[in-house]
Amino acid sequence: MKLELTYDIEKVLFEVVKRTVEVLGLEVEFIQDNYVKLSEDVSSERLKEIAKILATYGIIMGQEDKLDLLVQIKSLIKKYVQGDYDKNVPISTMLSEELGYSYSYLSNHFTSKTFTTIENFYILIRIDRVKELLAEENRTLSDIAYRLNFSSVPHLSSQFKKVTGLTTTQYLKIKKNTINTFN
């Protein structure tokens, strides 16, 4: 049997972190924007335990250091794509202004930690958002291209094909067939 899974990555992350911390007898005060606040201070040994368990899920944990900067960059890019920032302001300017570092520094830091560029990450996040918006039946490619700051529909289409290997039409057809298979 084949099942299609739809999930909210934020909820999944929250549950994985919460359960991991609770298994170790600790309590989560809150989780927000990739930050976790524990209800009490924890020894470095306990932090290593938490980090080791979370790493098995592909979650990297850091403390008030440069890893936080990486998390902040990713979080701001996601918010930018969601429309929380003026799309007339280039992403490089927004990141520099929000984080207080030159874009060159942020770019080098990001690449050294992720082995990809901010621009590539930004494209991936936009394509993920395109997929979400394509699922909304009343959305046109023109509307999506404008909303996500693509220069044109052909630009959106070429980026989509480059990232997914499919045209938007092929993607929708596969998605529709997959949904029909399970209904």
Image (tube, rainbow, N blue to C red):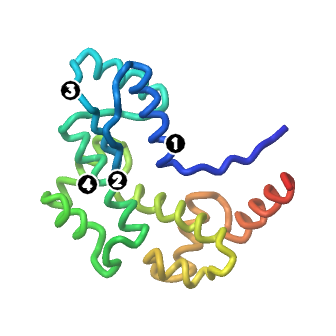
Q: Which residue is mark 3?
A: 41
Q: Which residue is mark 1?
A: 12
Label 1 sits on a secondary structure element that is helix
The numbered dot on residue 51 is: none
Which of the two labelled residues, at mark 2 and mark 3, occupies the earlier sequence position? 3
Which of the two labelled residues, at mark 4 and mark 3, occupies the earlier sequence position? 3
Residue at 44% x, 21% y is 23
Q: CA distance from mark 4 to mark 3?
A: 33 Å
Residue at 45% x, 62% y is 123
Q: Residue 1: x percent and y percent?
A: 85, 37
The part of the image, by quadrant, that contains residue 170 is bottom right
Which of the two labelled residues, at mark 3 and mark 1, occupies the earlier sequence position? 1
Q: Are marks 2 and 3 in contact (CB under 8 Å)?
A: no
Outermost top residue? 45
Nearer the observer: mark 4 or 3; the answer is: 3
Residue at 35% x, 25% y is 51
Nearer the observer: mark 2 or 3; the answer is: 3
Q: CA distance from mark 3 to mark 1?
A: 24 Å
Label 2 sits on a secondary structure element that is helix
The numbered dot on residue 107 is: 4
- In this rendering, is residue 149 above or below 8? below
Q: Residues within 10 Å of mark 3 (few under 14, many from 20)?
A: few
Which of the two labelled residues, at mark 4 and mark 2, occupies the earlier sequence position? 2
Q: Amino acid at mark 4?
A: Ser
The part of the image, by quadrant, that contains residue 97 is bottom left
Residue at 28% x, 42% y is 112
Q: Residue 16: x percent and y percent?
A: 48, 34
- In this rendering, is residue 162 above or below 54? below
Q: Which residue is mark 2?
A: 74
Label 4 sits on a secondary structure element that is helix
